Image (tube, coloured by chain):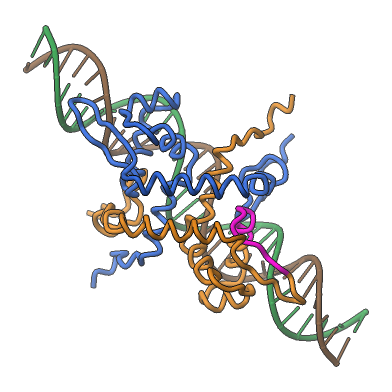
Chain colours: A orange, B blue, C brown, D green
DNA sequence: CCATCATATCAGTATCCTCTAATATGAATT
DNA sequence: AATTCATATTAGAGGATACTGATATGATGG
């Protein structure tokens, strides 16, 4: 039964989604900004010089991924890391990343950002 | 000058890219399969029951992200985690993920996988 | 050299993700 | 209850990513 339904998003899909929460520049900036202190949405918007809608969506993502929590106080909502372990994970990511940073940055030898799948087309204008 | 060049992919972009290496189901499966042992591409393909081209591209991604290394031996290429710290990071991701797993899985209440940005349209055709 | 096996790369399509602008909710204040 | 401020949600466009099938490289053995 329930044929068409996608269901069974087998643990790994969920785990991938969790990690994907960390894999975006803007979200990393947000996480950095609330690493040691709660901040309201507007404070984050200001700190990142970002777009309110965009930041709000990223916050929803981070919350949905179990990475941050929000606490309402009057009209404000204060966001912070979900717990100490998340903070430790972030720190460990930092440490490991520092080790490979150069190599990763060099990966796409020139100026494209991606090197994962294909570095296709785009720059062949002659 | 240098107009077209993207350059200046400021550390955070590179870090996001590094983490993005971990944020895909297939790549997580690959990492799991070589967590404790070297494997050749075809062994991985077999273990995951995957498509050779697809796996190969994911391996290139993982390598480009500094997560794994390849060692050629005759016609074979053996892939393994880059170092012990990567293994530790994977382990820590596991631990932290277990804590939030339920909540993350429940995030998109029904059967869609994403809850990050928008959970829009899509499933309303039956 | 030629055939074969292991792996990598290419091209196309379909899907997913991020961004922006516009609009909606909801709490506080008057 | 109307206005204002803080935040969330929606819609659409553009760009990035994953997957597949076909083809290319590169090593080995005859």
Q: Position of residue A66 (x, y in %)?
A: 62, 54
Q: Is residue A116 magenta?
A: no
**Residues rendered magenta in the picture:** A60-71
Q: Position of residue B61 (x, y in %)?
A: 35, 44
Q: Nearer the viewer, residue A84 or B80?
A: A84
- Write down the quadrant of residue B48 in the picture: top left
Q: Position of residue A71 (x, y in %)?
A: 71, 68
Please indicate whether residue B120 sits to the left or right of residue A105 in the image: right
Question: In the rendered image, which quarter contains the N terminus of chain A?
Answer: top right
Q: Residue at x 60, y 60 (%)?
A: A83
Q: Residue at x 40, y 64 (%)?
A: B12
**A97 relative to B22, above or below:** below
Q: Nearer the viewer, residue B18 or D9?
A: B18
Question: In the rendered image, which quarter contains the C terminus of chain A?
Answer: bottom left
Q: Nearer the viewer, residue A94 or D11?
A: A94
Give the total number of marks visible in the rendering. 0
Q: Residue at x 60, y 57 (%)?
A: A61
Please indicate whether residue C20 sits to the left or right of residue A122 in the image: right
**A54 relative to A103, above or below:** below
Q: Is residue A70 magenta?
A: yes
Q: Nearer the viewer, residue A27 or B88?
A: B88
- Write down the quadrant of residue B11 in the picture: bottom left
Q: Position of residue D29 (x, y in %)?
A: 13, 12
Please indicate whether residue B70 sits to the left or right of residue A77 in the image: left
């Amino acid at each position: 039964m329930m044929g068409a339904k996608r269901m069974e998003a087998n643990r790994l899909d969920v785990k991938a989604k969790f990690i994907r929460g960390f894999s975006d520049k803007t979200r990393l900036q947000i996480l950095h900004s609330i690493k040691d202190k709660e901040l309201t949405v507007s404070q984050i918007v200001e700190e990142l010089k970002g777009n309110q809608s965009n930041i709000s969506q990223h916050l929803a993502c981070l919350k949905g991924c179990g990475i941050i929590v929000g606490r309402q106080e009057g009209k404000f909502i204060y966001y912070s890391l979900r717990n100490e372990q998340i903070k430790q994970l972030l720190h460990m990511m930092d440490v490991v990343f520092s080790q490979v940073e150069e190599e990763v940055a060099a990966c796409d030898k020139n100026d494209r950002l991606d090197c994962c799948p294909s570095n296709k087309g785009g720059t062949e204008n002659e």
